[in-house]
Image (cartoon, rainbow, N blue to C red):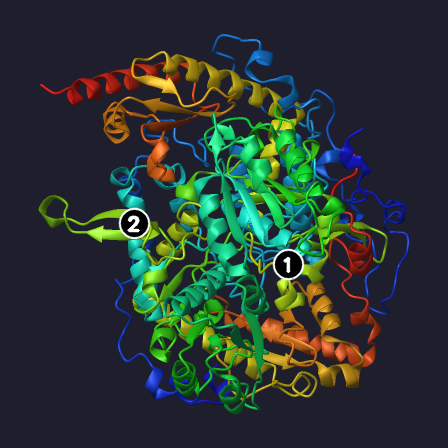
């Protein structure tokens, strides 16, 4: 090979191209390489020091959930033809992947009631941030009004990226567990680019999405156009964005039927593993008129020269590889394999299954909330309808209660204040229900949590 | 009828009215197979939504084991969905047959050569899938308490340390989800760094050879792109840099070696100029495969580096993700890193290390830019990248880069042989690093076929083509990156195929112009797809 290249040594290839001054003159300070079996043992020993949902009865949620992933998804996502190809830039040999994207877009569109879906975003919170950017591109306004019911990570991510693309983030508080309707209407003005809320919200409450959307549109159409800004979109209304939990959209009214313009969300619950927080995928769907501002890949249908139906990446002039600094986003690699898992999961659930699953979650979640709220020292944080997750307030230190439960093999849920940092969340516990949490599990949680709270309350009483 | 049906995005009479496949043989000449000849070509593309029948199902819902309550009492009617979503009604065998069938309409890396420039399509070891599937990794919730996620946190810590060593920069965040997400974090870090010093800078310099994500990122981060020229050797034009580097420049974004496969020999001087005006130097890690263990971005003077775990570190591409884009930064940038960071203390029993996530950086008074996503990042990708690094070790990574560069230079040499070199000359330089860019300009003029046609004809030879029409600087560009995991035999076969296509074109340019012939579909109408987008199945 060296002869073909015309050099005397491999070293010569580097000597002729890399200046001495930037050459690393020592080996990398890394452990020596290992045979496959040793690497496997090492990774297994690391895994053994993690308590997963396999090792305890877990009610952890707050954005990612221990749903059952059917075996056929593992089989499909491990297939070479789905696991190892690149982004489909050569569509003739990528019809499998492109058709999967097209089917995924269709499924998300059906779920959300919005006609234009992309082929995936990275995950939930960054999809919320991307929606803010879309709103900015759409109407050029400065304010993002958000509900405090958004996931804390969405709020933080939005603040970080909005600081970059030059928008102000105004947070509207909750009242009785849902977005305060008066504060919401008041916060939205003629300078509001987008109004963003979560459905269900972070505290598990089902919001009145239609009312929030209507209020957002009404708030600005009544406002005087005093600041002289040019508005895109009908009536100068802000872009209404909802961060949704897709798994309950078989039961909850879809955002597209509630006046929402852009629906985003965390897709992990749809056929993807917990994986300590990623990879998963973000869903991103919108009304027709936002199509050309959408971020990320979009697969479109077409025909080939012989008239065969086929699929291609389309509207690529939005994207970074074509439009560069004028692109609608910088997304290149997204979450195609995770979106494959998502569409297969939705297909596996099917039209009836997603409704049945939603009804099961609704029934069990309410059973769990009622059962736990009857315990001494435990009360509901709010009384709003809940469907898969709910918040409690404990009359005891949440950290200590959780440790006692963990010792009994039960993880009772998320310490709310630790996640939100809000003073009013002190004593808060967020409990998530999936179809894997049976009545038996819930009853065990009640026993263990009840005992833990009681023990902590006793311990707190001065002698 | 669903409100969705009123949208125009799902139906188009022009598309629905297309002819049955196999009717017309278009283009080609002697030696071109009849269109519609292969079984995959005869198969009509049918989506899962067009399959199944009412009542079929795959999922069996667990039984209701809690007391039934009138669900109208649990959820007000007005919050409820009135019609179920129109998801398919199919059985499990139908699902399996459908998606396995789709998989056969895909080319993939396990099946063949994929010399896409700057994509680093190297082999994805299957050990990584086995390791990532262990329930201790796969079923671990991101909000599990640190004391019961020590394996995961240690893995992240170790990966951070390894990436820091490879980059030559001490502080790492694993949070960004992809390379371009890492770029966004990096530019936001740069802004925070300048704002902290009381400065507002508006511009980011980036060469005209940069990957499209670089300028797109700059705009998303609220800054302005200023293009830098490339000199005749393929590096940054130093005079242009000196002219444009001023105190309104926040950052210079570079990759080294660049997208021409050229290592910029002036890199230290470039760093000096940039730092001299108080700006930061950002390294796009897409081309790291050329230099692992050989040269480190930190030693070249870079302040911020992003890695693509789905490139050099074997995270499978998945047809477009998932990826992961960790960043490594210098001391002066470290205070601004996203939150949380993995921390280590040696306060376990007997001084054993314990690991935690430090959220403190996000508190008031901290300088962190905050979060760029939920939770900690794509941990599943960390497991795979970490397994790779532990498998290869330092020597193995050096070996990988050396072989990547060797393979690229060998393939380049094969393509410099008579018959090919005249049509597809190397655009810049003589040797290359891990990739090289050829220009199809002469081929277009002499043989009347374009780089696009060459690429499409390569599909008939069972190869994925190289990257085409990038970088923009090169006329009819063809960017080739073989990686270190390809054999000499494969490289020879690819070079032979290119030579054969050129010979064929000299005799009859129509053959390549109408290629491919043997793929499941042939050339697709992308113009109509953009003019009248159809992006969901009509119901």
CA separation in Å, label 2 and label 1: 33 Å
A377 to the left or right of A342: left
Looking at the rendered structure, which numbered label has been put on residue B360?
2
Q: Quadrant of residue A329?
A: bottom right
> Circle 2: is it few (<14), some (14-19), or many (20+) Cα within 10 Å?
few
Q: Are marks 2 and 1 on the same chain?
A: no
Whether pointer 2 and pointer 1 mark residues with C-beta atoms closer than 8 Å, the reply is no
B259 to the left or right of A234: left
Quarter of the rendering occupied by the N terminus of chain B: top right
Rendered residue at 69%/68% (across/down): B458
**Where residue A338 sits: x, y (%)?**
54, 44
**Where residue A231 sits: x, y (%)?**
71, 53
**Where residue A232 sits: x, y (%)?**
73, 52
The residue pinned by badge 1 equals A328
**Where residue B320 sits: x, y (%)?**
58, 54
- Vertical order, B462 against B138 (above or below): below
In the image, B390 versus A163, the foreground residue is A163
SS category of the residue bearing label 1: loop
A33 to the left or right of A321: left
Q: Chain of mark 1?
A: A
- Vertical order, A343 against B207 (above or below): above
- Vertical order, A268 against B323 (above or below): above
Quarter of the rendering occupied by the C terminus of chain B: top right
Q: Is residue B326 visible?
A: yes
Q: Quadrant of residue A430?
A: top left
């Amino acid at each position: 090979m060296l002869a073909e290249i015309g050099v005397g040594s491999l070293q010569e290839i580097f000597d002729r191209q890399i200046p001495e001054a930037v050459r690393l003159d020592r080996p990398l300070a890394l452990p020596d390489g290992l045979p496959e079996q040793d690497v496997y043992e090492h990774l297994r020993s690391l895994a053994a020091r993690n308590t997963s949902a396999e090792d305890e009865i877990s009610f952890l949620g707050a954005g990612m959930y221990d749903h059952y992933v059917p075996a056929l998804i593992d089989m499909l996502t491990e297939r070479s033809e789905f696991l190892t190809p690149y982004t489909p830039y050569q569509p003739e040999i990528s019809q499998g992947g492109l058709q999967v994207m097209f089917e995924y877009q269709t499924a998300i569109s059906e779920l959300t009631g919005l006609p234009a879906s992309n082929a995936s975003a990275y995950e939930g919170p960054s999809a919320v941030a991307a929606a803010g950017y879309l709103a900015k591109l759409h109407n050029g306004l400065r304010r993002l009004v958000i509900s405090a019911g958004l996931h804390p990570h969405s709020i933080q991510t939005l603040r970080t990226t909005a600081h970059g693309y030059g928008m102000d983030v105004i947070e509207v508080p909750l009242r009785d567990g849902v977005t305060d309707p008066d504060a919401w209407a008041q916060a939205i003005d003629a300078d509001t680019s987008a109004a963003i809320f979560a459905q269900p919200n972070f505290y598990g409450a089902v919001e009145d999405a239609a009312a929030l959307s209507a209020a957002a549109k009404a708030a600005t159409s009544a406002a005087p156009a005093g600041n002289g800004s040019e508005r895109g979109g009908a009536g100068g209304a802000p872009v209404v964005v909802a961060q949704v939990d897709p798994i309950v959209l078989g039961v909850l009214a879809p955002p597209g039927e509630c006046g929402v313009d852009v629906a985003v969300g965390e897709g992990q619950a749809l056929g993807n593993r917990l994986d300590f927080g990623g990879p998963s995928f973000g869903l991103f769907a919108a009304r027709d008129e936002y199509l050309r501002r959408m971020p990320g890949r979009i697969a479109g249908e077409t025909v080939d020269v012989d008239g065969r139906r086929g699929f291609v990446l389309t509207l690529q002039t939005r994207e970074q590889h074509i439009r560069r600094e004028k692109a609608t986003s910088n997304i290149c690699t997204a979450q195609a394999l995770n979106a494959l898992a998502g569409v297969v999961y939705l297909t596996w659930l099917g039209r009836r299954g997603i409704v049945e699953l939603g009804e099961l979650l609704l029934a069990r979640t309410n059973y769990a909330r009622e059962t736990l709220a009857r315990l001494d020292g435990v009360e509901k944080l709010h009384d709003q309808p809940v469907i898969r997750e709910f918040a409690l307030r404990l009359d005891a230190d949440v950290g200590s209660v959780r440790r006692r439960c963990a010792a009994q093999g039960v993880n009772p849920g998320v310490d709310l204040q630790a996640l939100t940092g809000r003073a009013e969340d002190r004593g808060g516990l967020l409990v998530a229900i999936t179809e894997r949490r049976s009545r038996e599990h819930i009853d065990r949680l009640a026993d263990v949590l009840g005992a833990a709270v009681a023990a902590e309350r006793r311990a707190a009483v001065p002698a | 009828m669903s409100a969705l049906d009123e949208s125009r995005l799902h139906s188009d009479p022009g598309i629905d009215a297309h002819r049955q496949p196999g009717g017309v043989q278009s283009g080609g000449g002697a030696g071109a197979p009849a269109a519609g000849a292969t079984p995959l070509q005869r198969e009509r593309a049918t989506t899962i939504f067009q399959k199944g029948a009412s009542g079929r199902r795959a999922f069996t819902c667990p039984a209701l084991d809690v007391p039934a309550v009138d669900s109208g009492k649990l959820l007000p009617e007005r919050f409820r969905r009135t019609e179920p979503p129109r998801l398919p009604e199919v059985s499990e065998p139908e699902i399996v047959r459908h998606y396995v069938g789709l998989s056969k309409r895909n080319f993939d890396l396990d099946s063949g050569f994929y010399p896409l420039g700057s994509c680093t399509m190297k082999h994805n070891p299957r050990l990584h899938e086995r390791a990532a599937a262990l329930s201790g990794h796969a079923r671990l919730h991101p909000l599990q308490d640190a004391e019961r996620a020590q394996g995961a946190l240690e893995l992240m810590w170790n990966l951070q340390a390894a990436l820091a060593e490879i980059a030559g920069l001490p502080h790492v965040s694993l949070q960004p989800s992809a390379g371009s997400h890492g770029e966004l974090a990096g530019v936001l870090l740069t802004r925070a760094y300048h704002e902290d010093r009381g400065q507002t800078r508006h511009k980011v310099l980036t060469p005209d050879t940069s990957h499209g994500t670089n300028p797109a990122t700059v705009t998303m981060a609220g800054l302005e792109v200023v293009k830098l020229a490339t000199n005749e050797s393929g590096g940054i034009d130093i005079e242009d840099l000196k002219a444009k580097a001023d105190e309104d420049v926040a950052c210079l974004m570079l990759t080294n070696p660049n997208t021409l496969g050229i290592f910029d020999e002036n890199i230290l001087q470039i760093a000096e100029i940039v730092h001299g005006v108080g700006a930061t130097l950002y390294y796009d890690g897409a081309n790291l495969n050329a230099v692992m263990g050989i040269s480190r971005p930190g030693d070249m003077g870079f302040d911020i580096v992003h890695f693509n775990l789905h490139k050099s570190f074997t995270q499978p591409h998945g047809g477009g993700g998932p990826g992961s884009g960790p960043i490594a930064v210098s001391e002066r940038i470290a205070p601004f890193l996203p939150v949380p960071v993995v921390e280590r203390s040696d306060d376990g029993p007997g001084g054993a290390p314990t690991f935690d996530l430090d959220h403190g950086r996000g508190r008031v008074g901290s300088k962190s830019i905050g979060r760029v996503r939920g939770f900690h990042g794509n941990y599943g990708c960390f497991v795979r990248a970490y397994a790779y690094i532990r498998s290869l070790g330092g020597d193995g990574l050096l070996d990988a880069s050396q072989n990547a560069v060797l393979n690229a230079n060998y393939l380049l040499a094969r393509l410099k042989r008579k018959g090919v070199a005249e049509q597809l000359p190397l655009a810049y330089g003589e040797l290359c690093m891990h990739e090289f860019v050829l220009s199809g300009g002469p081929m277009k003029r002499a043989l009347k076929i374009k780089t696009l046609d060459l690429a499409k004809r390569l599909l008939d030879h069972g190869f994925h083509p190289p990257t085409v029409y990038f970088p923009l600087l090169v006329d009819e560009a063809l960017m080739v990156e073989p990686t270190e995991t390809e054999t000499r035999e494969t490289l020879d076969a690819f070079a032979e195929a290119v030579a054969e296509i050129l010979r064929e074109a000299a005799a009859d340019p129509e053959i390549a112009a109408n290629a491919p012939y043997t793929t499941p579909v042939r050339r697709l109408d992308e113009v109509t797809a953009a003019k009248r987008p159809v992006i969901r199945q009509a119901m």
